[in-house]
Image: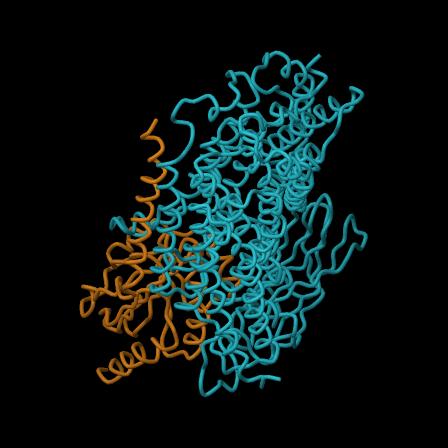
Chain colours: A cyan, B orange
Amino acid sequence: MLPVHILPELGQVTLILALLVAVSQAAMPLAGAQRGRDSWMAIARPAAYLQLVLVALAFAILTHAFVVQDFSLRYVATNSNSLLPMQYRFSAVWGAHEGSLLLWALILATWTGLVARFSQRLPAAVISRVLGVMGLVSVGFLSFLIFTSNPFARLLPAAAEGRDVNPLLQDPGLIIHPPMLYIGYVGFVVPFAFAIAALLDGRVDARWLRWTRPWTNIAWGFLTLGIALGSWWAYYELGWGGWWFWDPVENASFMPWLAGAALLHSQAVTEKRGSFRAWTLLLAIATFSLSLLGTFLVRSGVLTSVHAFASDPARGLFILIFLGLVIGGSLLLYALRAPGTDGDAASAGTPFVAASRETLLLANNLLLVAACGMVLLGTLYPLLADALGLGKISVGPPYFALLFVLLMAPLVLLLPFGPLTRWQREQISRPLAMLLPWAGLALGIGIAAFFLAPYGRWKVAAGLVGAAWIVAGTLRFVWTRFSASGNRFTAEMLGMTLAHTGVAVFLVGALLVEGLAQQRELALRPGQAVELGRYVFRLEGVERLQGPNYIADRGSVRVLRDDAPLTTLHPERRSYASGGQVMTEAGIAPGINRDLYVALGEPLGGGAWAVRVHIKPFVRWIWAGALLMALGGFVTAGDRRFRTARNRVAADSELEPASGFNVDDLQPEVVRR
Amino acid sequence: MTLGRWLPLVIFAALALLLAAGVWLSRNPNREALPSPLIGKPAPAFSLPVLHESGRLVSSAELRGAPYLLNVWGSWCPECRVEHPVLTRFAETKRLRVIGYNLKDERVDALRWLEQFGNPYWLVLVDYEGKQGIDWGIYGAPETFLVDGGGVVRWKHVGPLSDAIIRDQLLPQLTALDGRQ
């Protein structure tokens, strides 16, 4: 039995071993695939598994150090203290830069292990290249950890007491937010690795593309969950009642989400029709690159934000070089090897005319990519202005909100047409005729809402028109599938329906809460009340409360609706022992059609407290919509076709790619007759 | 067409250049700590509205007679949140008047920010457009100026205050001021 106090050194050694394994996982299989040496390629899988074991061990050792509070580790001493409750000791592991980077490496190793496990039927050369590329990425992250951000660095003599984990992060929502987000971010490494493998190989095989589609969908689903969790957390924890702030770090996660959404759709086109091959490869590279860029922006200290990790120029430089190698290298490879420029029919896919589903999906892609570029520009513009000496400029929510709405409105308009329009060639009048009554219904709902809404009528009407239009159009598609006998309704279609409905639900939440939210801010003495809409909020009192590592003022606010008691809310204002930072915990009465939200401000003297009261209609729909979108991603990934496709790869592995397309699973059969 | 394939790489190269500039700028933490040309000179004359009392204007002449600390902040400024507990601790020592200089902010947001995190300021002045801030040479927030009783700028700090900066720089300045008077 090893003495426990040398565990951190063991963790250090484990990380170094993992780096060495990653180097061999990258070098040998890539070289082997290039030269056709089976024995070199055979290293890929065992190396992937071994790396997973080593990184998991390092992670377990760091977690152990947090649980037993080994303050002789600098990272533990800076990011926890003895008052920290047990559940936050686990989440404190990824509460700051070093540990979250280790979590990133662990998730990367896990994805690699899963790819190794579930790729048994892919040709050896393909999987060797894929695992090799993932190994390269891993080399970058593990060296980043070991050389600039070692979580096992000692602090000798050991500190008697640790500092605290940032109070912002001491929250159940934040325990699972980073893992979800990272699973999403890192998951995009799979399509990326396949894109690089395809470029190295010199051909894009639709069967391998089909194999990557579920991975992209799952990664995107997790990223959606991660972003939604972050937004939900900001809503109840920051005490502002807002749910999205266009903060640089939020933008950093939103960019890969937008690119990933474009990638999902373009992969479907390439897999089914063979079109857009080069574009799909480029998007796969771009999506993962944006994930890396997000990491860079958050950790380099180049941009300032509420979320920023402690910055260090050496780290910034390291990630920048890593970014340059990975992204620059990939794009160089793309420029040299991308398909589609030789004009040969095989790489162009099935031809299509302007009125076709391909065109609609292309429009979808362009709009999503434009939105992504807009967010990128807005996020980096302050940096650009600074670098050019134009002074310090901040780009605010008005810029993002306006441009985002302008770009997303046509997307909403076109969305119901997508599933109903035929591949290749379509008569525009056909889907138009199918959707016209539903457009009328949506407009009718919008007009009614416009005249019924007490205020914010434009936003309310726009939200309801958009949502009704998407739901009706999507249901029209479902009905088309079910009305003709013998039609299959695949998991892929179900996933698409769920995700598109999610967009509608999100629209209702986002625009109704923007249009109809009510708020009052005022000073209340115990016993005094404020009336807002049908509700009366009465401050009963404020008491002092001792938490495990904070002191809180806890208000009791009695809520009455139409003079009948409804509930009592307990907003808190916490002052953490270690840093003196004040955190608000809003008191929220959740509901499907509205949230009641009370935040406690500072004491104003004379027993009065600043109190902020919100009514947030339909705010939950924002996150419900995101949940539906994520679920759509997961359900799609479970489509049987992707599994049987693997069998087919095994059977047909000698087939040329041009004949490998599965023609048109999504086309409504009723139309074909 | 072949040009099109190189386009992503070109865009990325431009982006990488920008990020490199960002890293280079952040390498040098003192990039903004240029000695203010104001130090040792009279503070610019101003007349600014007061956040908590609409309609009231306060001029630089009214503040003469005792030293004050002018702290530039805005509710839009994340680093001001970092600085806030430090400034609050310092203000509670009552060494001198701490005056807030609310820069390019919405009144409602500024009031809400103070209400949420607490108000350490003796008085908050509002510079909605940031025009008078130009006379002070204010780049952004947070920035802090020490002005003595005669209206002369004695010290300036760019970026968030920390306990160490207050202990090592501001307090010696204050001691020197006390000696002078």
| Along the viewing direction, whichever of A17 and A137 lies nearer the viewer | A17
| Along the viewing direction, whichever of A341 and A518 lies nearer the viewer | A341
Q: Quadrant of the C terminus of chain A?
A: top right
Q: Quadrant of the N terminus of chain A?
A: bottom right
Report the number of discs.
0
Query: Is any atom of residue A458 visible in this view?
Result: yes
**Image coords of residue A141 (percent x, y):** 45, 60
Identified at 69% across, 41% down, the residue is A638
Reply above or below: A19 against A75. Answer: above
**Image coords of residue A406 (percent x, y):** 48, 31
| Along the viewing direction, whichever of A380 and A359 lies nearer the viewer | A359
Identified at 48% across, 86% down, the residue is A158
Reply above or below: B82 against A239. Answer: below
Looking at the image, residue A62 sits to the left or right of residue A150; the answer is right
Identified at 51% across, 71% down, the residue is A14
Query: Is any atom of residue A617 visible in this view?
Result: no
Identified at 56% across, 63% down, the residue is A50
**Image coords of residue B81 (percent x, y):** 45, 63
Looking at the image, residue A312 sits to the left or right of residue A509; the answer is left
**Image coords of residue A519 (percent x, y):** 61, 49
